[in-house]
Image: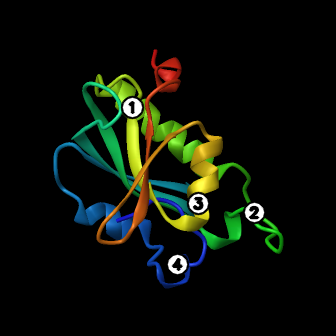
């Protein structure tokens, strides 16, 4: 799957409770940022995965999706600011908690690539079959580790 993006969320099932109930495995975390019954973002984390730019392992962000109404854009009046950044910080903290030094990796949809560059993730290569750009946090994540 992929992390981020703008145009693909209209078809998403935003029922975070149903999605979370379907996941019953070790080394997998499904996280949803909610306010009352409203879901602002969802993220699926898998670990351990092999890091590409550093020795060791990382937490892989299998998908991260921010609700369309909470995304940055010229014609969007967001309900909540900083949702994507907060979710990335959570992924880093999970990596810390799992002893993976704050390292995370993900594949980005094209519309979200600038977001991950701004967050300091190192750019990798485009991978088949979806031709999505790979990003990895190799430095700075450990600063969020206790």
Disc 4 is placed on an element classified as loop
Quarter placement of the N terminus:
bottom left
Q: Which residue is mark 1?
A: 103
Report the Cα–Cα distance between label 3 and label 4. Answer: 12 Å
Q: Which residue is mark 3?
A: 112
Between 17 and 80, the residue placed more toward the observer is 80
Give whichever of discs 3 and 4 has the lower sequence position: 4
Residue 37 showing in the rendered view: no
Q: Residues within 10 Å of mark 4 (few under 14, many from 20)?
A: few
Q: Mark 3 or mark 4: which is in front?
A: 3
Residue 31 vertical placement versus 37 (above, below):
above
Q: Residue furthest front?
A: 125
Report the Cα–Cα distance between label 3 and label 1. Answer: 19 Å
Give whichever of discs 1 and 4 has the lower sequence position: 4
Left or right: 125 as drawn, with respect to 10 = left
Residue 46 showing in the rendered view: yes
Disc 1 is placed on an element classified as loop
Q: Which residue is mark 4?
A: 8
- Give the label on residue 86, or none: none
Report the Cα–Cα distance between label 1 and label 4. Answer: 27 Å
Q: Residue at x 38, y 44 (%)?
A: 105
Percent position of residue 9, x then y: 53, 76
- Give the label on residue 79, or none: 2
Report the Cα–Cα distance between label 2 and label 1. Answer: 30 Å
């Amino acid at each position: 799957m992929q992390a981020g993006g703008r145009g693909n969320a209209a078809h998403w099932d935003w029922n975070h409770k149903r999605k979370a109930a379907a996941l019953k495995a070790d080394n997998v975390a499904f996280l949803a940022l909610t306010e009352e019954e409203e879901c602002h973002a969802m993220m699926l984390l898998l670990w351990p995965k092999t890091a590409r730019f550093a020795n060791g392992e990382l937490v892989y962000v299998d998908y991260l999706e921010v609700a369309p109404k909470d995304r940055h854009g010229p014609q969007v009046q967001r309900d909540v600011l900083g949702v994507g950044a907060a979710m990335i910080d959570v992924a880093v903290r999970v990596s810390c908690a799992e002893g993976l030094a704050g390292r995370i990796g993900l594949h980005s949809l094209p519309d979200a690539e600038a977001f991950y560059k701004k967050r300091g993730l190192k750019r990798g290569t485009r991978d088949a079959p979806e031709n999505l750009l790979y990003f990895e946090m190799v430095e700075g994540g450990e600063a969020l580790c206790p």
